[in-house]
Amino acid sequence: MKDLMKLMQQAGQIQAKMQRMQEELAALEIEGKSGAGMVTVTLTGKGDMRSVRIDPSLLKPDEAEIVEDLVLAAFQDARTKVEQAMQERMQDVTGGLPLPPGMKLF
């Protein structure tokens, strides 16, 4: 019975940590860059795009496709960084509680 109580207590602690982590992720802003920093995309920790910055030298009509590719690459860079940040925070939240490989809690 003590093990069940301990497990319930751990579940409550994890739930509280998850709530804090989600609040932190909503406030977190991560930049992704491409084209040697000529295109920058900023995402929140939840993956919402906050801003896109494009170096004015790229804004030439005949280079639109290049700019589109760079924006996509910067977005992917930022998204990868967001996912890494989420994984790091999840390890902090679930530390000590074994979860099956690949299990996502959110």
Image (cartoon, helix red, strand yellow):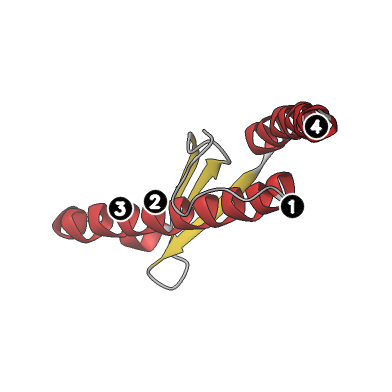
Residue at the location (47% across, 44% down)? Answer: 103
At x 37%, y 55%, the residue is 76
* Of callouts 1 and 4, the N-terminal one: 4
Q: CA distance from mark 4 to mark 2?
A: 34 Å
Identify residue for label 2.
75
Q: Which mark is residue 13?
A: 4
- From mark 3 to mark 2, how far is it between C-alphas? 5 Å
Amino acid, disc 2: Phe
- Label 2 near label 4: C-beta < 8 Å? no
Q: Position of residue 90 (x, y in %)?
A: 64, 47
Residue placed farthest to the bottom in the image? 36
Q: Type of residue at label 1?
A: Gly
Indicate left or right for 43 with 73 as reference. right
Kindly check if marks 3 and 4 are in contact, taking CB atoms under 8 A apart as contact.
no
Query: Which residue is the site of mark 3?
Result: 72
Disc 1 from disc 4: Cα separation: 12 Å
**Residue 31 location, quadrant:** bottom right
Left or right: where 88 falls relative to 41: right
Say which label, 3 or 4, has the lower sequence index: 4
Instruction: Check disc 4 and report its element: helix, strand or loop.
Output: helix
Q: Position of residue 55 (x, y in %)?
A: 43, 59
Name the residue type under label 4: Gln
Residue 49 numbered mark, or none? none
Name the amino acid type tagged 3: Leu
Tag 2 and tag 1, C-beta contact below 8 Å: no
Check disc 2 and report its element: helix, strand or loop: helix
**Count of labels in the image:** 4
User: Closer to the N terminus: mark 1 or mark 3?
Assistant: 3
Q: Nearer the viewer, mark 2 or mark 1?
A: 1
User: Contact (CB < 8 A) between labels 1 and 4?
Assistant: no
Q: Nearer the viewer, residue 98 or 64?
A: 98
Residue position marked by numbered label 1 in the rendering = 96
